[in-house]
Image (tube, helix red, strand yellow):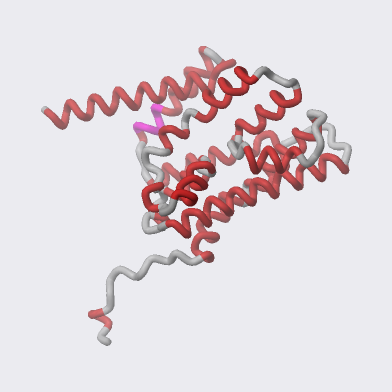
């Protein structure tokens, strides 16, 4: 066959190798981060095996670190529910653009929804994953889930065996991971106005209400995005 008649668009690669190569750079960060969770579980006075249980059942990243303290202090169920709602409310926006429509079957959609994390969203909406269907999407989310549980289990076991008094450096793992995700998202869709708005909201919230920085910054940034959308729609109508 002549070279000119070859198809210009090669078939999409949905192999396990392609899924791992795209997910591994982010997923490997789950090991030290999960270990930090395991150390925290042990230091809170809970048995080591609670670390993989928290990681497998809750599977909500930053919420799990808060849940360790809430579980250790037997916090009221209302406090737990309100904390969960505030911390994980951002997932409502993730669902608007995550390719859940490409996942077939009730069981597949249920698991994909359950394991929709910040990292899974970042990979799922990336240009490299735009042709992924049920199998590669679920493989990616399962990989992240298993790495998170593995890291937490290792942290719990090491924390039980060794007298580690301070988690020097590991407490920054979550912040570092989100910085990497933000940089990667900006590289894929460079939008200086959005980046500047997010940074401004974070700085203002840090200066005005440092004790509620995350919630306040999220609320302010959501308001900025809504205003931007309304202005854009008015311009399009005009």
Is residue 101 or residue 152 the one in the foreground? Answer: 101
Question: Does 126 sit left or right of 79 as displayed?
Answer: left
| Image quarter of residue 40 | top right
- The vertical placement of 123 against 220, above or below, is below
Residue 177 percent across, percent down from the top left: 58, 41
Q: Is residue 69 left or right of residue 159?
A: left
Q: On the picture, is 76 further left or further right than 235?
A: right
- Residue 128 within the segment the image draws in magenta: no
Q: Residue furthest front?
A: 106
Decide which of 229, 49 is in the foreground and name it: 49
What main secondary structure does the magenta stretch of the protein show? helix
Q: Residue furthest top?
A: 208
Q: Residue at x 29, y 26 (%)?
A: 228
Residue at 58% x, 23% y: name it. 81
Tell me residue 123's x, y (percent).
Answer: 47, 49
Give the residues drawn in magenta, as a range: 193-197
**Compared to 135, does 193 lie above or below?**
above
Residue 17, compared with residue 29, is above or below; it is below
Height in image: 12 above or below 22?
A: below
Residue 38: x %, y % from top left: 74, 39
Residue in view at x 57 percent, y 55 percent = 24
Query: Which quadrant of the figure has residue 198?
Result: top left
The quarter in which the N terminus is drawn is bottom left
Quarter of the picture containing the C terminus is: top left
Outermost left residue: 238
Q: Look at 42% across and 46% down and name the residue there.
A: 187
Provide residue 32's location: percent of width, then percent of height. Answer: 69, 45
Numbered label tally: 0
């Amino acid at each position: 066959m002549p070279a000119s008649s070859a198809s210009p668009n090669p078939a999409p690669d949905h192999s396990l190798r392609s899924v791992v190569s795209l997910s591994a750079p982010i997923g490997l960060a789950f090991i030290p981060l999960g270990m930090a969770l395991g150390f925290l579980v042990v230091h809170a006075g809970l048995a080591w095996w609670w670390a993989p249980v928290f990681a497998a059942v809750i599977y909500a990243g930053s919420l799990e670190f808060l849940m360790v303290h809430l579980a250790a202090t037997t916090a009221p169920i209302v406090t737990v529910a309100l904390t969960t709602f505030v911390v994980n409310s951002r997932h409502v926006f993730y669902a608007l653009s995550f390719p859940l429509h490409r996942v077939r079957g009730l069981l597949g959609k249920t698991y994909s929804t359950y394991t929709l994390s910040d990292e899974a969203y970042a990979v799922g909406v990336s240009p490299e994953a735009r042709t992924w269907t049920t199998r590669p999407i679920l493989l990616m989310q399962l990989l992240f889930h298993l790495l998170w549980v593995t890291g937490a289990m290792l942290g719990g076991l090491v924390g039980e065996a060794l007298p580690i008094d301070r988690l020097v450096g590991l407490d920054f793992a979550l912040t570092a991971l989100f910085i990497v995700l933000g940089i990667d998202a900006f590289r894929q869709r460079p939008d200086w106005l959005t980046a500047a708005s997010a940074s401004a909201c974070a700085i203002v919230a840090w200066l005005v209400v440092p004790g509620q920085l995350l919630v306040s910054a999220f609320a302010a940034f959501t308001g900025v995005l809504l205003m931007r959308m309304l202005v854009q729609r008015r311009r399009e109508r005009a």
